[in-house]
Image (cartoon, rainbow, N blue to C red):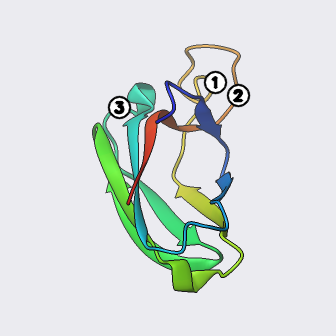
Amino acid sequence: MLGRLAWSEGKNAFLFFELSENNKKDYELEISYSPYSKNKKENYDLSIYLNNIFHKKIKIIDHDVIKIPIKYSLNNKNKFIINFEFDGLVSPYDLFESPDARKLGILLNSIILKG
């Protein structure tokens, strides 16, 4: 498990990871996140892709956990890319709160690989 990480910025954010060659089994990735709270509780969409294959689309409303099954058969090299594609993000600048123009998505609180 990793500790508090960083904000996603902009339309796309990526996680890259590699499992040991000896780990030839299925896993589940749990990603705990917090949405950018200044979004005024408006919904914004998050599409999730695993190795360029669409996984699911969710509405980000409140603190939540994303669960992604990691199938060994998806990639025999044990290398994985998770792409988060956001729609409808706002920045502190958009809300006239700060000169910070970064479009903030989610804050990654933890990443846990279960298997």
Residue occupying the far top of the picture: 98
- x, y percent for residue 53: 58, 81
* Residue 17 appears in view: yes
The circle drawn on residue 101 is 2
Q: Residue at x 51, y 32 (%)?
A: 2
Q: Amino acid at mark 3?
A: Lys
- x, y percent for residue 54: 52, 79
The C terminus lies in which quarter of the figure? bottom left
The circle drawn on residue 93 is 1
| Residue labelled with disc 3 | 40
What distance separates the C-alpha of mark 3 from that of mark 1?
A: 14 Å
Q: Residue at x 58, y 23 (%)?
A: 92
* Residue 60 appears in view: no
Q: Are marks 2 and 1 in contact (CB under 8 Å)?
A: yes
Where 4 falls versus 32 (above or below)? above
Q: Amino acid at mark 2?
A: Ala
Is residue 108 toward the left or the right of residue 63 in the image? right
Q: Residue at x 45, y 31 (%)?
A: 36
